[in-house]
Amino acid sequence: MPHLALSPGALAHIDRDYDYEVDRDPPNVEPIEHQIRLDFMRGGPVRRDQLLGNYNPWSYKAETPATHPWRGIKQKPRGLDYAEASCDVRIREEKKFYEHADDDTVLVDAPAYLAARIREASEQSDPHEAVREVRKDREKWYQELIPGANLRQILKESSYGSLIEKCIGPTPDANHLLEHNAFVGMVIVDDDTNPDAIAREHDIDSVYVLQESVLSHANTDEPVALADYGIELPAPVLVGEYDSGSQYPFIPWGDALTCSCPYKQSAPFRVMCKHELLASIVCGDNDSIFIPLTRGIHVPHRARRFASPEIAVSHQPRTAGGHPSP
């Protein structure tokens, strides 16, 4: 099996070789991203009648109830309830970083991007105002962008609904989801490498050795490559094959995985895509932080770890008001 070579930025922060640079590396997998995955894992399958139809995510305002969907007959997915509560908790938990913006002993515990922004703001001519702006932007992310412009958008019939169209039943669970979607262990090679030669060298079925250029993420307007995340090819990774016809690899990054699809990669504020939502529901049904292998080669566990073990053992899904879920 080819070795899965990871860059220092792709490692867990507790790894002695960890070295993540905000200005050099792709966006890190933030704590809230891990927590939201765990929330949807705990929340269970999403029913068809919970998906939104016509919804403009940019019309959503946290302080304006009239812009909130799931009113009347529609019931909000439980995982989304938990995710919104997690966002509220994060706002309170990050308060200390703004109050101690000049104290590195406090900032060392802040998410990497936030710590970098606060340190940069602290060097401005009016550091208090600059830090206040950082806090304002961060809270807008938690209060509006994540729930309104991201999670509600993927919880639409035209988004997550496209992955469950052919599934049987009103509430597709892992078994039904995996009848039409798959997580396949593959070896990905570059265009200068003969897949058949790699298959013979490592005694692998050639159907599970593909050039990166044939996968969906390489054929978008602004393609992201595995090399952009420091992954050296050939590399054994997990590839999602979906009912919609696309094939997107999951990229090991920041103690978890990130989907290579353009929806996720084109906007750093997006913490989840429809493919990661499906993976969350499947992982929840399997009661595991590892995405199950449907078929293919047995890729390393690091290529299937969907959420940080450190956060998984400490995160408690909560309901509105920050109360632990029953």
Image (spheres, grey):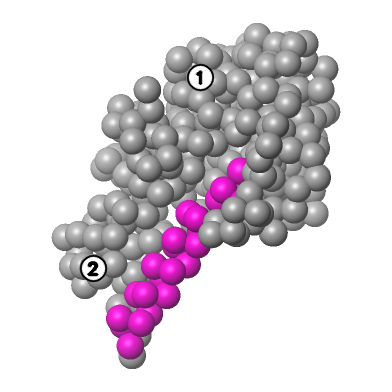
Q: Which residue is mark 2?
A: 99
The residue nearer to you, when weighing 15 against 241, is 241
Residue reaching furthest front? 72
The residue nearer to you, when weighing 151 against 313, is 151
SS of the residue under disc 2: helix
The answer to whether any part of residue 288 appears in the image is yes
The spot of residue 40 in percent (x, y) is 52, 29
The answer to whether any part of residue 260 appears in the image is no
Distance of mark 2 from mark 1, alpha carbons? 37 Å
Q: Which region shows up in magenta? A: 126-151
Residue at the (63%, 14%) spot, across then down:
173
The reply to whether discs 2 and 1 touch (Cβ–Cβ < 8 Å) is no
The spot of residue 54 in percent (x, y) is 80, 45
In the image, residue 206 above or below residue 247: above
Pick whichever of labels 2 and 1 is earlier in the sequence: 2
Circle 2: is it few (<14), some (14-19), or many (20+) Cα within 10 Å?
few
Circle 1: is it few (<14), some (14-19), or many (20+) Cα within 10 Å?
many
Q: Which residue is mark 1?
A: 284
Residue 228 bears which disc, if any?
none
| Amino acid type, mark 2 | Glu
